[in-house]
Amino acid sequence: MEALLIPLSVAGLAALLLLADIAPAKGDARGIGSFAALGLFGTLALTWVVAPGADPSGSYVSDAFTVFVQRLVLLAGALACVASIDHADAHFPKRQGEFYLLLVASVFGMTLIAGARELVLLLVGFETMGIPQYVLAAMHKDKKVGVEGATKLYLTGALSAGLTIYGASFLVGAAGTTFLPQIVTTAPSAMLGFGALLVLAGIAFKLGAVPFHMWIPDTYASAPAPFVAFLSVAPKVAVLATVARISWASGEGMFSWWTGDLLVLAALTLTVGNLFALPQRNVRRLLAWSGIGHAGLVLLALGLATTDGIGAALFYLTTYVVSNIGAFVVAEAVGGKVGDEVEGWNGLARRSPGLALAMLLFLLSLGGIPFVAGFWGKVLLFRTAWAAGQSAMVFYGALLSVVSLFYYLKIARAMYVEPAKDPTPIAVGRATILAIVLALIGVIGLGMFPAPFYDSAEEAGTALLVTGPVALVTP
Amino acid sequence: MTGPGLTAYLIVAAVMFALGLYGVLSRRNLVAIVVSVELMANAANLNLVAFSRFGGHPQGEAFALFALALTVAEVVVGLALVVLASRVSGTLEADAMSELKG
């Protein structure tokens, strides 16, 4: 039971939120957001005391990889909760309880994925992550665009779930078991390959890999912004964990079928994400398309088929979590007042110098400029890819990173060069400021001291190789 | 064992899955799309139960039960969204959803 401490804590937090939500309301409903955030930060602290080990059936294992992934999703969830407090109170004050409940439920699914070594648990985790997101995307239920974005997310998500489960049925059929270590060591067959391909396609939907990306810009532009901050980072971590858990279930890998596919997906995703971000005039859409580009880099790292690649991807995602959440929180704080079009951001540096500086740092980090977090993420990812012999992909990825500076700096130019039409400062809530400051600490901290974080990401990647044998529940 | 063999079940499931996939991609009515999603999920369940019956291992059937629960949860949320969409936009046609473009 001890191995399951983290998922159980998150589930317990969700249960408490449910109780708080149905209890007769009195006083300030804002408190429930602070409670959810504190609960997730508390669980994050628990990850330092959880004992390594597996649950008795061997379906779930808690090792360095599990813990690293859980820390990332808990951090993303907690930051999103803090960032949501002002937004939820202003836009859906009566439904705050369910908002946080669903957010925490989604985090619960991700913490299960992190340690799953059994296909049913993995898929249950995957759906527990996905289903609450459909509802969260529709929180602005009176707005036509909000419902439209949520419906698009749902339709692609449901299609993805259909593909994944149908593919998984072939894996189970070919291997005769649902335990991943046995599935991946089953003799290769057409059935197994077909199943693996369908599962990969289903997973790629969640990551937003091209050609499964069409929902991303619409959903990002219409869903509640603090939730988008979460949606843009946490599922990427969960998808990475899913692919890694399946691939290294036995310490060897299923990548014999996946490597080529992943690299093709990576090249497509990098190209489309970065090029379509270029003409965007809407800040949220720009961040959405650039997020697709970042997903391409994660796919590149996965396609290396080495645990070093997984480590590099984990570190890259660490930098991405703080940078992208920060950027979306500022986008919400500013966009809520002046609209999402980039023209509205003109002269922000004179109106609200603090917000403008924070956004600049987040954008520089996303673009990979030295001495903020994203730089180290990109450098170490490219170095790992280079060492694995993917020099062409490294050149291509670096080229597109330069391209990405053009669109990131478009926002910076509006903030710093263009004159402001309206010189009044933008009012920002206290909780939103706290979220921005926390993300800034992450971005600057990771930029100054990347080494300990990179080491533990590497260690998490290597831990995939040393998972012990499964305690079998034989029929 | 008499009756149709494993391949027959797999073919039926594949036909169901293909129909569901075709429905999701081609139908314009939101309810029809949700029904098609359900069809795809049931194809997977049929596969799982057939593999379990002919392979002699119970895990496939257990998986099918979990898969059913997941599909139900997903369809419930989907239908709620469809109701919401019809209330907000007054139609069930997916083509009416054109405020957001890519």
Image (spheres, coloured by chain):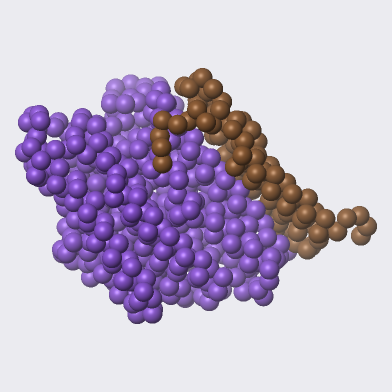
Toward the viewer: A429 or A267? A267
Where's the C terminus of chain A, which quadrant?
bottom right
Determine the image quadrant of residue A444. bottom left
Taking A398 as reference, is A413 left or right? left
Taking A445 as reference, is B91 left or right? right
Taking A473 as reference, is A234 left or right? left
Chain coloured purple in this rendering: A
Toward the viewer: B28 or A374? B28
Residue depicted at 29% across the width and 46% down the height:
A279
As drawn, which residue projects farthest toward the right? Answer: B2
Chain coloured brown in this rendering: B
Position of residue A390 relative to residue B76, above or below, is below
Position of residue A39 relative to residue A274, above or below, is above
As drawn, which residue projects farthest toward the front? Answer: A279
Percent from the top left, x then y, of residue A195? 63, 61
Residue depicted at 26% across the width and 59% down the height:
A403
Percent from the top left, x then y, of residue A22? 44, 26
Toward the viewer: A473 or A389? A389
Position of residue A439 relative to residue A188, above or below, is above
Residue depicted at 93% across the width and 57% down the height:
B2
Position of residue B37 relative to residue B85, above or below, is below
Toward the viewer: A333 or A201? A201
Percent from the top left, x then y, of residue A270? 37, 59
Q: Is residue A43 visible?
A: no
Percent from the top left, x then y, of residue B4? 88, 55
Taking A386 as reference, is B37 left or right? right
Q: Is residue B56 visible?
A: yes
Residue depicted at 34% across the width and 46% down the height:
A288
